[in-house]
Image (cartoon, rainbow, N blue to C red):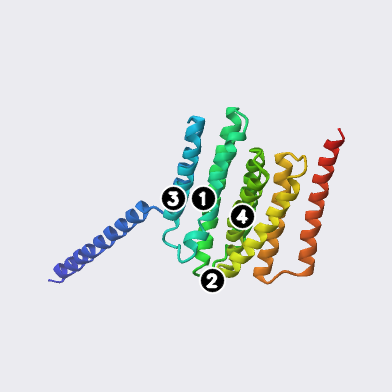
């Protein structure tokens, strides 16, 4: 009887262990099959890169509509990848940069040399930078809900990509040789959402009335500079540098003000940087005039 009892106990233990292993294996399989955020970001980056490649194979007439479609898909795919954490105004503000960046790269693609190597390098850089931008947007979406340690790094990456996006837009605008008022209007329309998203990334408030006003003032400053330099015989790259510098200074000042760190020394640093860039551009322009 005692032997029978021991065997029964051992058998019962085995029957209890087996279901636990089965459940654990099932959980591991379920976790492995889940589409994580990082996988979504990678999928979105590859899809948008493929979209850029497809656009270049289309006729010139069809490319404009294709770029509009790409912009819409950029917003939709970004919202899909961040859908679990987007709340309130983040549904709009957090999607601005991931929508504008692929759009301007697609337009800027027209101005690149036709060499295949150059285009493949741009596609590779875009894939990596787009993935980083989606990670940054994810951090902003999460930080709007709860505290996260990576917020400072995300702000730095977002700031850099914001200036790059603005620079590409300015280069394209001045390369089209449009009428003066159209150029100024386009500069304002491009700068406003970039500044709004950049300022909001430092406040992450649900009430964005002050951010809207700050972005409007900053965009007006950049547009006025665009009006001023339009009277110069200035090349698109130099115009892009000037307006990017202005965007850098305006966004930096408003971000420091939103964070409560707008000290006199900070203002002096931004003014000093803008002065150096301005003198370099003016010297270059004057030198070309004298030739």
Q: Earlier in the sequence, mark 4 or mark 2?
A: 4
User: Which disc, if any, is residue 207?
Assistant: 2
Label 3 belongs to which residue? 77
| Circle 2 or circle 3, nearest the eye | 2
Q: Earlier in the sequence, mark 2 or mark 3?
A: 3
Question: Left of 4 or right of it: where is 45?
Answer: right
- Please tell me whether residue 227 is drawn above or below residue 237 in the rendered image: below
Which is nearer the eye, 25 or 221? 221
Which residue is located at x 70 percent, y 59 percent?
Answer: 250
Label 4 belongs to which residue? 157
Q: Residue furthest left?
A: 1
Circle 2 residues within 10 Å: few <14, some 14–19, many ≥20: few
The answer to which image quadrant residue 16 occupies is bottom left
Q: Earlier in the sequence, mark 2 or mark 1?
A: 1
Could you tell me how far apart the alpha carbons at marks 3 and 1 are, in whole angstroms?
9 Å
Which residue is located at x 45 percent, y 65 percent?
Answer: 87
User: Which disc, if any, is residue 99?
Assistant: 1
Circle 4 residues within 10 Å: few <14, some 14–19, many ≥20: some
| Circle 4 or circle 1, nearest the eye | 1
Which is nearer the eye, 15 or 27? 27
| Circle 4 or circle 2, nearest the eye | 2
């Amino acid at each position: 009887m005692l032997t029978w009892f021991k065997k029964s106990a051992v058998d019962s233990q085995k029957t209890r262990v087996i279901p636990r292993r089965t459940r654990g294996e099932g959980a591991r399989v379920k976790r492995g099959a889940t589409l994580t955020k990082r996988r979504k970001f990678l999928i979105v980056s590859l899809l948008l890169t493929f979209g850029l490649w497809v656009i270049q194979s289309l006729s010139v007439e069809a490319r404009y509509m294709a770029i509009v479609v790409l912009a819409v898909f950029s917003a939709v795919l970004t919202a899909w990848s961040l859908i679990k954490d987007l709340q309130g105004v983040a549904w709009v503000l957090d999607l601005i940069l991931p929508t504008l960046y692929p759009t301007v790269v697609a337009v800027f693609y027209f101005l690149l040399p036709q060499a295949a190597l150059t285009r493949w390098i741009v596609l590779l850089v875009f894939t990596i930078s787009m993935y980083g931008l989606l990670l940054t947007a994810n951090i902003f979406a999460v930080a709007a809900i709860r505290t996260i340690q990576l917020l400072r790094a995300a702000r730095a990456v977002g700031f850099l990509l914001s200036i790059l996006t603005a620079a590409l837009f300015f280069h394209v605008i001045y390369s089209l040789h449009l009428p003066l008022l159209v150029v100024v209007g386009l500069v304002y329309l491009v700068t406003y959402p970039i500044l709004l998203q950049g300022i909001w990334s430092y406040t992450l408030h649900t009430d964005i009335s002050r951010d809207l006003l700050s972005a409007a003032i900053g965009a007006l400053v950049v547009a006025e500079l665009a009006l001023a330099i339009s009277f110069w015989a200035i090349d698109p790259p130099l115009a892009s540098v000037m307006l990017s510098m202005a965007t850098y200074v305006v966004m930096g000042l408003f971000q420091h003000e939103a964070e409560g760190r707008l000290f006199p020394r900070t203002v002096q640093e931004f003014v000093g940087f803008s002065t150096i860039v301005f003198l370099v551009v003016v010297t270059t322009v004057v030198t070309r005039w004298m030739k």
